[in-house]
Image (cartoon, rainbow, N blue to C red):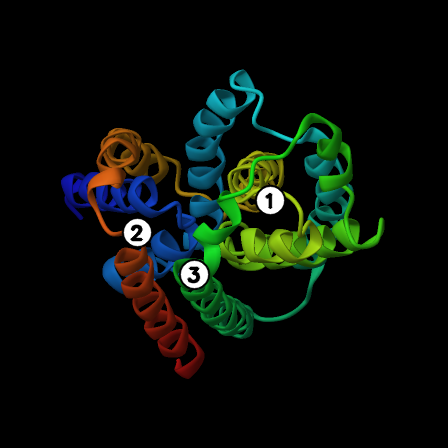
Amino acid sequence: MDQTAFIFAGFVVGLIVGLTGVGGGSLMTPLLIFGFGIKPALAVGTDLLFAAFTKLGGSINLAVSRSIDWKIVGSLSLGSIPASLLTLYVMKHSSIGEAAFQHVITTTLGFALVLTAGATFYKAQFGKKRDVPTLAAGDAALAIKPLHPLLPVAFGALVGVLITITSVGAGAIGVTALMILYPSLPLSRIVAADIAYAVPITLVAGLGHASIGQVDWPLLIQLLAGSLPGIWLGSRLNSRWSDKALRTLLSLLIAYAGIKLIAL
């Protein structure tokens, strides 16, 4: 297939991520499967590294501005990285046939997309309300305390498995869950923690997929060539668009893709 099509796809997904903040996995993986006929396992592996490199740039900017609560990132990673490694081990040594394995991926991905659609819709309707209060210095330590110390680790483990199998789980699902786990933390800092947390887990899962031959490296380079300028442009245009309308529309598109995958 003409590489221009992949570059353009990367640009469009990057533009949407820049405009809305919705994770690329919920957009890129279905696009690769339905739009380009890429096998689900190869689409997931490639998209994981696509997400890792894409969000690394965002994490660097957030780290420089000191917007990341590293304690939250550490708690999530404590659960997600071991869970991802265990999932990769099971995937590598499983005796399940390729057809059955592809079915597991598409079905799990479908349900993950439906969850993402619901989380995206919730953020579109209610997410902005979280950014109104500004934390006083004395309240910052209290805000990063979860409802229970083990909940972030447990959530990290669950999302680690989900991301490794489907490349979907950070982004809208992660932000929505963190809003529940850290009810006093402003949305901007929740988003920052979610972006930073996504980098190590997608990198570990992506390299794991690469080790079993489930990453298309030329395709990855073409997608990144389009996505990086797309994100740059989207982040500069997002103030001119209705965030609520865009997220609502995206939630419907993602839900449609999820239902279609479940029905395969």
Q: Amino acid at mark 2?
A: Asp
* Real-space Cα separation, disc 1 to disc 2, in angstroms: 30 Å
User: Which residue is depicted at the point 43% across and 61% down?
Assistant: 120
Pinpoint residue 222: horizontal percent, then vertical percent. 27, 35
Who comes first in sequence, dot 1 or dot 2? 1
Residue 160 vs residue 216, the one in the foreground? 160
* Real-space Cα separation, disc 1 to disc 3, in angstroms: 23 Å
Residue 117 vs residue 98, the one in the foreground? 117
Q: Nearer the viewer, mark 1 or mark 2?
A: 2
Mark number, residue 205: 1
Q: Nearer the viewer, mark 2 or mark 3?
A: 2
Who comes first in sequence, dot 2 or dot 3? 3
**Callout 1 crowding tier (Cα within 10 Å): few <14, some 14–19, many ≥20:** many
- Mark 1 in CB contact with mark 2 (< 8 angstroms): no
Q: From what the image shows, is residue 49 above or below residue 129?
A: above
User: Which residue is depicted at the point 35% across and 55% down?
Assistant: 27
* Real-space Cα separation, disc 2 to disc 3, in angstroms: 11 Å
User: Which residue is depicted at the point 45% across and 44% down?
Assistant: 215
Pinpoint residue 127: horizontal percent, then vertical percent. 47, 55
- Quadrant in the rendering for residue 148: bottom right
Q: Amino acid at mark 3?
A: Thr
Judging by the rendered image, the residue that carries numbered circle 2 is 243
Pinpoint residue 219: horizontal percent, then vertical percent. 32, 40
Q: Quadrant of the C terminus?
A: bottom left
User: Which residue is depicted at the point 25% across and 29% down?
Assistant: 229
Say if residue 136 shows up in the picture.
yes
Judging by the rendered image, the residue that carries numbered circle 3 is 120
Q: From what the image shows, is residue 105 above or below residue 218?
A: below
